[in-house]
Image: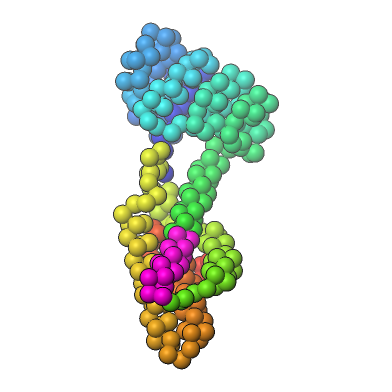
Amino acid sequence: AGIRPIMITGDHKDTAVAIAKQLGIIKDASEAITGSQLNEISDSDLDKEIEKYSVYARVQPEHKVRIVDAWKKKGKITAMTGDGVNDAPSIKRADIGVGMGITGTDVTKNVADMVLADDNFATIVSAVEEGRRIYDNVISNILYNLSSNFTEIAIILFGLFTGNTIISAIHVLYIDLVADTIPSITLAFEKSSKGTMKRKPNGLNKRIFTRFFSAFLIVSVILETLISLIVYHHFKADGILLAQTLALLSIIINEFVFAYNCRSLKERISKRGFFSNKY
């Protein structure tokens, strides 16, 4: 998932290195450092060298806080997990504090942002995957709702400049309160993309309005607006009410089709499965 695990332990350095090698956290002992060695390194030097080390042995609570602070200065999002009272300061200082629900002390659980009910490190992996799924679905929902609202604005503005009432106020309310609501809710039930856990973390400065997002939004608004205007003007000669009704219907149909396109911005619907989201 592009997340780097760091081992911080009170155990002996040789023990920590042996286990870290088995887990694939480090390749050799040069990537490990002890608390006593940390005491000899200034904060500024630690900030420069923090990326060298993946294992910290024989550490004290204040060392854990220094490690978290050094990584944060690098612009990284930090998550600290622990169960003891001595872990509380670093868990609180980290961007995401993870406490243990079974063996964790009350102090640790109170300062944590997330508590592992089963005390299993692998649960963090599941939480990351679910968090990314939720994030992706939120972005899809934003795109869907912006497209719908900008389309309504474009149609209303066109009507104002040309002296036509293409859709009325009650139509706008119906679209916003009924037609848009159901697809928007169902988009929240989309499953994770296949490559979700192979992506790098978004980081703090990830923009919602990427080039792809903006292009997708602009094209959808233009298409939906044009289709509705064509329908309105085609049937205008048969009566304003009929033209308005069919313009409204075209907007709703377009938005339902677009909602299907918004199911995933990471992979094609054909790969995702046309009927994978039963809702």
Q: Quarter of the image holding residue 161?
A: bottom left
> What's the residue at 40%, 42% (across, down)?
201
Q: Where is residue 254 drawn, in percent x and y?
A: 45, 74
Residue 167 vertical placement versus 34 (above, below): below
Residue 126 vertical placement versus 68 (above, below): below
Q: Nearer the viewer, residue 174 or 117?
A: 174
Q: Where is residue 179 drawn, in percent x and y?
A: 55, 70
Query: Which corner quadrant holds the N terminus?
Result: top left
The residue lying furthest to the front in this view is: 163
Colour style of the rendered protein structure:
rainbow
Q: Nearer the viewer, residue 74 or 231?
A: 231
> What's the residue at 39%, 86% (across, down)?
234
Q: Is residue 138 magenta?
A: no
Visible residue check, residue 151: no
Residues rendered magenta in the picture: 144-163
Residue 198 vertical placement versus 69 (above, below): below
Query: Which corner quadrant holds the C terminus?
Result: bottom right
> What's the residue at 48%, 50% (across, down)?
135
Q: Nearer the viewer, residue 273 or 17?
A: 273
> What's the residue at 52%, 73% (across, down)?
168
Residue 217 vertical placement versus 88 (above, below): below
Q: How many marks?
A: 0
Q: Where is residue 57 drawn, in percent x and y?
A: 46, 18
Q: Is residue 100 left or right of residue 33?
A: right
Q: Where is residue 205 drawn, in percent x and y?
A: 38, 40
| Magenta span: chief secondary structure | helix
Q: Is residue 162 magenta?
A: yes
Visible residue check, residue 212: yes
